[in-house]
């Protein structure tokens, strides 16, 4: 079925829905379905299809993650942390339809030569997509292995031409209470919004730091942070900020949301470290989604070789 005539990111959300509905309606009619199911049933089926439909992406495969056993798409897209919707793990998948991901602009500002605002489609014209299978470890003690599709974070940052005065980069998730119900609760919200994360510049341009626009071959489900999110595989999951709206280059270390919420429990670096326990639980082990037994957590989540050099002079108990 050839329903994609333009590159995915050039199609508006309504247009996609219309095309899917159009083609599926024809499909149903061809089956003669209309003759024996009620229009109500067709409408129900169509709306389920509409929800599940994700645009396939074109990308190249890479060697990242060879040999790792993948979690299922089902696992990775129905057990989420996305506080803008809910603190429940199951609710983001049910609520995320209110997030409108097209059109979507990303703004760049701060210590850079090229202050600019770009549509996701223009960003995607400047990069090539690749698939990377990464381990992902949440600070809460669960983990997963996911095939992300995207491009190196360095490529995104290069668009803005950071100045040498840029020592850090901060990211902000969109603030829009119409799209994110928990943002509408003001001081009663689960955490302060917008969600903010940050990296030191050398971390941000490390080859592993990744911007994901898809997973499992297709565009990101909204609950996983569409249309674009960070993936920093050697750090706890909260560093991998979702649905990025702004990128700010700074001279000083930005204060990330979780540090603002509880600086004793969550730091800026958040490198996965089985030696440094969370004040309320051990970080020595993790449970992979779908697994019964726990396995040992690896230093830097298994990416020591690629990233440890950046922290060689730092006391990682202090800079947790
Ligand atoms: N904007 C935003 N980004 C976020 C979060 C969030 O609540 N809001 N949760 C973080 C946490 S704690 C984790 S573990 C991962 C979860 O990503 P996933 O739902 O794709 O597994 O997203 C991170 N990024
Ligand atoms: Mo997390």
Image: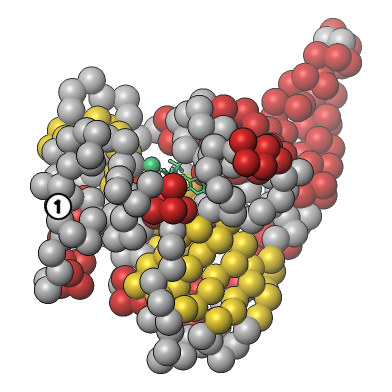
**Residue 209 in picture, x, y percent from top left:** 36, 65
Residue displayed at 54% across by 37% down = 190
**Residue 256 in picture, x, y percent from top left:** 43, 58
Q: Is residue 162 visible?
A: yes
For disc 1, the marked residue is: 299
Rendering quarter of residue 35:
top right
Between 292 and 17, the one lying in front of the other is: 292
Is the residue marked 1 within 8 Å of ligand 2, measured from its CB?
Answer: no
Quadrant assignment for the C terminus: bottom left
Q: Is residue 35 above or below residue 55?
A: above
Q: Coloring scheme of the render?
A: secondary structure
Residue displayed at 39% across by 53% down = 259
**Residue 232 in picture, x, y percent from top left:** 35, 58
Residue displayed at 62% across by 28% down = 94
Between 173 and 52, the one lying in front of the other is: 173
Is 59 on the left-hand or right-hand side of 40? left
Q: Is residue 281 above or below residue 9?
A: above
Quadrant assignment for the N terminus: top right
Kindly state the secondary structure of the residue where label 1 is placed: helix
In terms of image quarters, where does ligand 2 lie?
top left
Q: Is residue 217 visible?
A: no
Is 177 on the left-hand or right-hand side of 289? right
Between 192 and 108, the one lying in front of the other is: 192
Mark 1 packing: few (<14 Cα in 10 Å), some, or many (20+)? some
**Residue 200 in picture, x, y percent from top left:** 35, 72
């Amino acid at each position: 079925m050839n329903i994609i005539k333009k590159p995915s990111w050039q199609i508006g959300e309504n247009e996609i829905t219309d095309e899917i509905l159009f083609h599926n309606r024809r499909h149903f009619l061809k089956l003669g379905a209309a003759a024996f199911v009620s229009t109500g049933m067709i409408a129900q089926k169509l709306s389920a299809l509409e929800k599940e439909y994700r645009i396939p992406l074109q990308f190249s495969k890479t060697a990242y993650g060879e040999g790792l056993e993948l979690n299922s798409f089902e696992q990775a897209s129905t057990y989420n942390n996305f506080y803008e919707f809910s603190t429940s793990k199951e609710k983001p998948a049910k609520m995320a339809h209110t997030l409108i991901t097209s059109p979507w602009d990303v703004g760049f500002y701060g210590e850079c030569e090229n202050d600019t605002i770009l549509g996701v489609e223009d960003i995607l014209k400047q990069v090539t997509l690749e698939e990377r299978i990464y381990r992902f470890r949440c600070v809460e003690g669960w983990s997963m292995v996911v095939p992300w599709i995207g491009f190196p974070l360095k490529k995104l940052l290069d668009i803005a031409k950071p100045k040498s005065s840029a020592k850090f980069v901060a990211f902000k998730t969109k603030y829009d209470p119409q799209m994110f119900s928990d943002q509408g609760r003001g001081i009663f919200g689960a955490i302060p919004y917008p969600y903010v994360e940050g990296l030191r510049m050398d971390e941000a341009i490390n080859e592993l730091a990744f911007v994901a626009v898809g997973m499992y071959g297709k565009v990101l489900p909204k609950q996983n942070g569409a249309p674009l999110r960070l993936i920093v595989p050697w750090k706890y999951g909260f560093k991998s900020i979702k649905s990025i709206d702004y990128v700010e280059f700074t001279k000083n270390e930005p204060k990330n949301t979780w540090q603002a919420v509880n600086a004793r429990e969550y730091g800026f670096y958040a490198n996965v470290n089985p030696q440094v326990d969370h004040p309320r639980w051990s970080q020595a082990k993790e449970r992979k989604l779908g697994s019964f037994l726990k396995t040992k957590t690896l230093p830097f989540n298994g990416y020591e070789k690629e990233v440890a050099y950046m922290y060689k002079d730092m006391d990682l108990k202090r800079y947790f």
